[in-house]
Amino acid sequence: MPTLAQIARAFPDTRVTGNPEVMVTGATHDSRQVRPGFLFAAMAGDLTDGRRFIDDAMTRGAVALLVGAGVPNNLPQIVTADVRKALGPISAACYSHPTRELALVGITGTNGKTTITYMVEAMLDEAGCRPGVMGTVAHRFKGRIWNDEHTTPEAPVIQSIVRAMVDEGASHMLMEVSSHGLALHRLKGCAFDVVAFTNLTQDHLDFHGDMEEYAAAKLLLFTDAVENNPDARAVINIDDPFSVVILERLKRPALTVSCDPSSNADIRPVDKPGYDIEGINARIHTPSGIFDLSSPLLGPHNMNNILVSMGICMQLRVDIAKAMVGLERFDAVPGRLQRVPCNRGFTVLVDYAHTPDALVSVLEALKPITAGRLICVFGCGGDRDHGKRPLMGGAVARGADVAIVTSDNPRTEDPDRIVEMILPGVDGGGQSRITQRELREASSGYVVEVDRGLAISMSLQCAAAGDTVLIAGKGHEDYQILGRSKIHFDDREHAAAAIASLERKEGDHA
């Protein structure tokens, strides 16, 4: 258990007031999470000032404070010029630097992070390791789940979860690293052993402002986040143009990956992979030899995820032959091209694709392996980047045969207004609006149904043998945000219920 003085040394720009020998058992920036012995970080948030909650933190047992300026209080304090920048290293010290006690992998990029963490988890399991995962779907280890709404939580949450995983026996930690987490210094204090890059396309511009700032945030994982670990290694997808910038700035060994057999990437297919509705078949060149792969995952974008996952395992120096067994057995990520059981001759898939590029990738993967029509149900989230809405409409118009434009998580925006901002992209992509009655026989066109549940039912009612129905945007989420409230809503449940309803109706007419 560290003292306040020991903790303060984790960040250079600090001074201690009060008793420096007070023992600290943990840290938090949320007064509601304070437990006896904790340090409370009085950090300014988007809506409020953490100093307002110091009294609440004291009532709950806080023994020290992290503040940006001395406050009139009897508790010992660490005073620093920038609480947010200090919070990562200070939190790491409070929990005795848990990321130094396992192999930490950070994966960043617009798309693919979740899939790769699941893949590498399966590979490490097969190779005899004990991996934990921190990411969009859940933070988990050995069946235990830690709940937090952020892909990359605030620094005290990260450090407390990793400490718990280490204490329970974790040997590796696979972390999805978001641009928010990097820009807000949440990863400070983390000791990364391997960092990986997937791709960079438009997303989160409501937070970053423009693509330059978004890219600069992603780059931090390959510069600032590994600057204190000379042994850190990287895996870079060179199919993405931003890889050139990363490789120029990277000052450590890297494995490159590419889906192009003619590239000079370290990990690449020997020849063009085979893609069909059952999965992927490929022969893969690596520095460790050539491996034959048969995977139930769908599409070229998952081929890229596979290559990055292989690169991570190689940089971790695990038994790659054993890891490949785990990769071949791996069959699904929650909400990532997840199949909904259906015996009606068509395929139903739920996917988290919620950016223009993700939709393009998924639709391009599904189109050539779909015998009939490719039907896409999609919408856009409210209170988020308005600029990507017509782009998503255009992506679906060009990639799908038939589209149903609906609501996603409207939050505090009017769902009809969000749809209105999507439609210019659909129209510009060459699709024409049709009626619900025309939908069953149409070879192209789109309809609008703002009620997402009805839109999902509509897509399945119009599907025929050989069709593929893609329900995009929410993936693993089991809620919908209306206003400031969450209601239970799971695309997979709605699709399964709609399929069951169709089967009951057929049984009634038999």
Image (cartoon, rainbow, N blue to C red):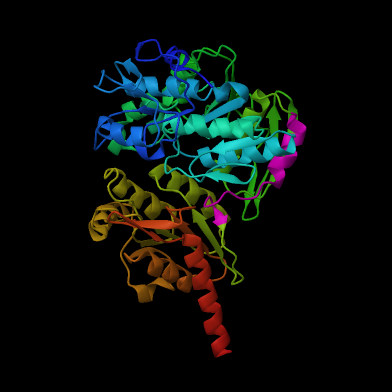
The quadrant where residue 167 appears:
top right
Q: Which residue lies furthest to the bottom in this view?
A: 509
Determine whether 369 is above or below 213 in the image: below
Q: Nearer the viewer, residue 66 or 462?
A: 66
Residue drawn at x 64%, y 35% is 168
Give, as a single range, the part of the protein colored magenta. Answer: 319-338
Counting the numbered discs, the total is 0
Q: Which of 75 and 432 is in front in this view?
A: 75
Determine whether 185 is above or below 479 in the image: above
Q: What quarter of the picture does the C terminus occupy?
A: bottom right
- Is residue 80 rendered to the left or right of residue 169? left
Viewer can see residue 379: yes
Residue drawn at x 52%, y 27% is 238
Q: What quarter of the picture does the N terminus occupy?
A: top right
The location of residue 63, given as percent across then percent down, is 40, 26
The location of residue 429, given as percent across then percent down, is 33, 52
Residue drawn at x 74%, y 25% is 288
Queried whether the magenta region covers residue 101, the answer comes back as no
The location of residue 150, given as percent across then percent down, is 42, 40
Q: Nearer the viewer, residue 225 or 485?
A: 485
Queried whether the magenta region covers residue 333, the answer comes back as yes
The location of residue 126, given as percent across then percent down, is 74, 38
Q: Which of 99 and 324 is in front in this view?
A: 99
- Is residue 208 rendered to the left or right of residue 464? left
Viewer can see residue 260: no
